[in-house]
Image (tube, rainbow, N blue to C red):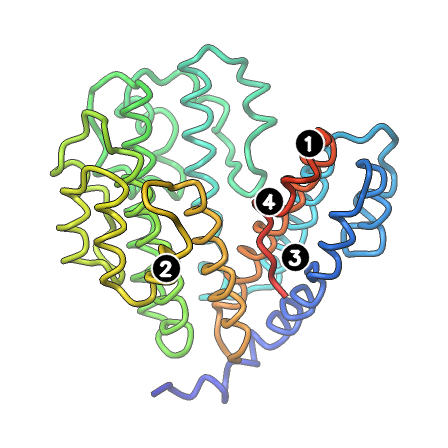
Amino acid sequence: MYGFEALTFNIHGGYLEAIVRGHRAGLLTTADYNNLCQCENLDDIKMHLSATKYGSYLQNEPSPLHTTTIVEKCTLKLVDDYKHMLCQATEPMSTFLEYIRYGHMIDNVVLIVTGTLHERDVQELLEKCHPLGMFDSIATLAVAQNMRELYRLVLVDTPLAPYFSECLTSEDLDDMNIEIMRNTLYKAYLEDFYKFCQKLGGATAEIMSDLLAFEADRRAVNITINSIGTELTREDRKKLYSNFGLLYPYGHEELAICEDIDQVRGVMEKYPPYQAIFSKMSYGESQMLDKAFYEEEVRRLCLAFEQQFHYAVFFAYMRLREQEIRNLMWISECVAQNQKSRIHDSVVYMF
């Protein structure tokens, strides 16, 4: 089924695979989360995290702490791990690691453009950008009035340039157009990443195909639910779905004509891997859907570590660390706002 990766993988990838498996061992366990859920204030959270990989990043932070500080420092740990791996990587692993950044770049572009539309200060917006998605000309995004300007003035020199071919219009940027731009860019990015992984072949292609197909299907469901009741036509909605995944192409045909959440549920329950996700929800409610998708994603990411000699472990580690940071943000917010009864609502356990 596979080629001879085992013979040659360790020449260039052995050291980094060992490093990333070591990082994975440092992810928080269920016992850690249970202890964090008992904390009375943010200083207690800092004290507990001091015994984890985040300890050195939080040790010099003075009281009183803020949730944003905890999230910022934990994200810094993620960025440092990523940069270390990228510095050590050779082709094609370095290109694979670069692809992991592109999603954050798209989010940062959308954040800056949306903030500028609502007349927010550019410096304040830059502080909110994810550090993995930063690029040299990001601050000049604020001058663009439509998609063509955005591309011509700023994005033509970034890795996102090829993904803009489908959203170059002269329409002015408004909230609806920006959201369509985000989803069009993500579609092009996921399809490009999928093709790159297929070219790599072997275990990397097999495992990444599954992970990216799940991501594409989740985005298709979210696009459908978010566009119900808007002016987005069925054809426009269908154009935003990625051209791969378990739902492609027949599931996309059905999702495109859904008018409410229960119809979406009816479509998804035809696909066995997604039956379990939708069985956790009552009819007519979508609040638990995000958590159910995150739990399924974490399960798949953890399975990526069960095989050796492939690049999917790097993608899986980055995603698991990002989920961990989301968990810590939720726990910190609940503790800071004295809403401890709601802590378990959004925490996704990993190990």
Task: Kindly report the distance in space between the C-alpha atoms of the residues bearing marks 3 and 4.
Answer: 22 Å
Task: Kindly report the distance in space between the C-alpha atoms of the residues bearing marks 4 and 1.
Answer: 12 Å
Q: Which mark is residue 84?
A: 3
Residue 269 relative to residue 319: left or right? left
Q: Amino acid at mark 4?
A: Arg
Residue in the picture at 73% in, 38% down? 70
* Residue at mark 2: 212
Q: Which mark is residue 14?
A: none
Q: Earlier in the sequence, mark 1 or mark 3?
A: 1
Residue 50 placed where, x, y %?
84, 50
Task: Kindly report the distance in space between the C-alpha atoms of the residues bearing marks 1 and 3.
Answer: 24 Å
Task: Confirm or deny contact between disc 1 and disc 2 (CB under 8 A).
Answer: no
Residue 292 placed where, x, y %?
45, 53
Mark 3 or 2, closer to the camera: 2
Residue 225 relative to residue 93: left or right? left
Q: Amino acid at mark 1?
A: Thr
Task: Kindly report the distance in space between the C-alpha atoms of the residues bearing marks 3 and 2.
Answer: 24 Å
- Closer to the camera, 136 or 43? 43
Quadrant of the frame with the C terminus: bottom right
Task: Confirm or deny contact between disc 3 and disc 4 (CB under 8 A).
Answer: no
- Closer to the camera, 14 or 270? 270
Task: Confirm or deny contact between disc 2 and disc 4 (CB under 8 A).
Answer: no
* Residue at mark 4: 326
* Residue at mark 1: 68
Residue 269 placed where, x, y %?
27, 59
Mark 2 or 4, closer to the camera: 4
Label 2: which secondary element: helix
- Name, please, the residue furthest toward the front: 282
Quadrant of the frame with the N terminus: bottom left
Q: Earlier in the sequence, mark 3 or mark 4?
A: 3
Task: Kindly report the distance in space between the C-alpha atoms of the residues bearing marks 1 and 2.
Answer: 30 Å
